[in-house]
Structure formats: C-alpha cells, structure tokens
Image: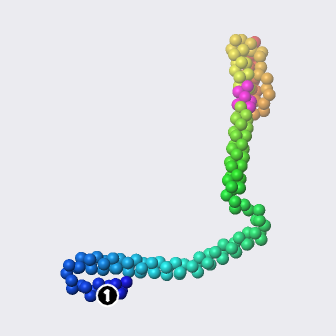
Amino acid sequence: MMKLLKEVSRVDYVLEHQPLIEETRRAADKYLTAIEKWIANDNELRNMLPEMEETGLKVQETVQAIQEAGWLGMDTNKEIAVIKTKRAIITGTLVAVFTLITGILAAFFMARGIAAPIKELKQTTDRIAEGDLKHRVRIKASDEIGELAISFNKMSESLQNTGR
C-alpha cells in the first residue's frame, strides 16, 4: 500500500490526474483505518482467549462435580427436555383440574350442610306462625346453627307456655 502511495506521489504534479490521486489517497486511508481496526479487534480477541479458556475450565470442573454428585441422569437432549416439559404441563393441568373439582364438590356439600338446617328452621317457623306451637326443630348439629335451633325450641316452648 505504501508503495502505491509513493508511485502516486511521483505523478502528483500532473494536474489532470489530481482527482484520481485524491480518490486513491482517500481509499488508501480507509484501507489503513480498516486494517488498524482489524488489528485492534484481533488484539482484543487474543486478550479474551485466556479468560474464555478459564471459563471453559470452570464449566468442565462444574460438570465433573455434578457427575460425581450423582446427577448422571441429567438429560441435555432438547427433544427429551421438550417431552418432559410437556409431561409436566399435562401433570400440572390434571392436578389443577382435580383440585378444582374437589374444591367445587367440597363447597357444594358445605353449602348444603349449612342450607339444610336453615331451611328446616324456616319451615318450623312457618308452622309456629300458623299456630302449631308444639312443633320443634330437630337438633342435629352442635355448631352455631345447632345453638340457634336450641334457642328457637326454647322460644317455641315459651310461646306454648304463655298461650296456656
């Protein structure tokens, strides 16, 4: 490249070749700049090689430690990983559906367990309102609803005693 520039400089005195000479100098400058960048990048890459080698050795040591720890069955095959992921998704979905159905059934039976005694209490209230003061609520529970039934029966008994 330098040889070319020297040759161009010899014919520099010819004015009609001046634009061609300038274009050649600009192209040579661009070429030299590109070479300098390439050399700088090459040097940077050379400086990175030891770091990359050190990282590679650490990865190898880690893999060896994992294998020594008994993780030999670890699959690195992409197809196997995809199959196992699909199985996990299916299993998770089935567990979620089962949990949802179980929750719905539990809620249904709990609601029924609460609604049935309240319905019976309402029917007894209707019979007492019609004048049947001897009718009592059958107590089946010992929770708050059972306590309400006991209180209701006491009230019915008081009404019956008052009416005599």
Residue 98 in the image, given as x and y percentages of width and height? 73, 40
> Which quadrant of the figure contains the C terminus?
top right
Q: Mark 1 points at which residue?
A: 6
Under mark 1, the amino acid is Lys
Does the image show residue 116? yes
Q: Where is residue 19 shown, x and y percent of the image? A: 24, 76
Q: What stretch is highlighted in magenta?
A: 109-116
Q: In which quarter of the image is the N terminus?
A: bottom left
Location of residue 2 in the rendering, given as x and y in whole percent from the top left corner: 36, 86
Task: Look at the image and say whether residue 113 sits in the magenta stretch.
Answer: yes
Q: Which residue shows up at 53% across the image and 81% down it?
A: 47
User: Which residue is depicted at the point 68% across and 55% down?
Assistant: 79
- Is residue 151 something that shows in the picture? no
Q: Is residue 28 above or below residue 162?
A: below
Does residue 6 appear left or right of residue 49 in this picture?
left
* Whether residue 151 is situated above or below residue 21 in the rendered picture: above
Tell me if mark 1 has few (under 14), some (14-19) or many (20+) residues whose alpha carbon lies within 10 angstroms of its own: few
Above or below — where is 71 with respect to 109? Answer: below
Nearest the viewer among 37 and 103 is 37
Q: Is the magenta stretch mostly helix, strand or loop?
A: helix
